[in-house]
Amino acid sequence: MPGERKGGSAGGWGHGGGLGVVPESPSAGVGEGVITAIVEGGQGATPLRRVVGADTYTPLAGAALLVLPGDADVVAAAEKFS
């Protein structure tokens, strides 16, 4: 996978001078707060991408894969930094 992906609710990766944030969902994750902190910290010129899953609760077990961002989603967003 291009760059480094860190796990957790709001993982990120550095790739070609950009930063990606991968929260679980658009409304329940901490991705917006992470990006806000980056911008308020003076790094607003850094290219940013946010990759999110479906705007729904996260189901248990294998069904979670239907609504969470997948590896292909993260790779596609990272490649946009190139």
Image: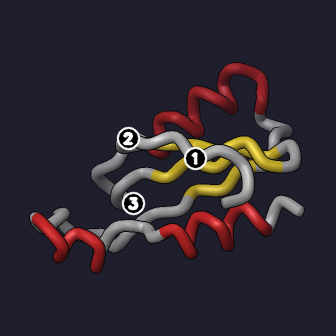
What quarter of the picture does the C terminus occupy?
bottom right
Does dot 2 land on a helix, a strand or a loop?
A: loop
Give the amino acid at mark 2.
Gly
> Residue beneath label 3, please?
26
Q: Residue at x 79, y 48 (%)?
A: 15
Up the image or down, 35 lies above or below 28; here it is above
| Label 2, residues with CA under 10 Å away: few <14, some 14-19, many ≥20 | few
Tell me which label, 3 or 2, sits earlier in the chain: 2
Q: Residue at x 43, y 67 (%)?
A: 69
User: Mark 2–mark 1 contact, CB under 8 Å?
Assistant: no
Tell me which label, 1 or 3, sits earlier in the chain: 1
What quarter of the picture does the N terminus occupy?
bottom right
Q: Residue at x 38, y 41 (%)?
A: 8
- The x, y position of residue 50, in whole percent, is 58, 56
- The x, y position of residue 32, in whole percent, is 48, 44
Q: Nearer the viewer, residue 56 or 63?
A: 63
User: Mark 1–mark 3 contact, CB under 8 Å?
Assistant: no
Does dot 3 land on a helix, a strand or a loop?
A: loop
Q: Residue at x 69, y 32 (%)?
A: 39
Give the amino acid at mark 1.
Arg
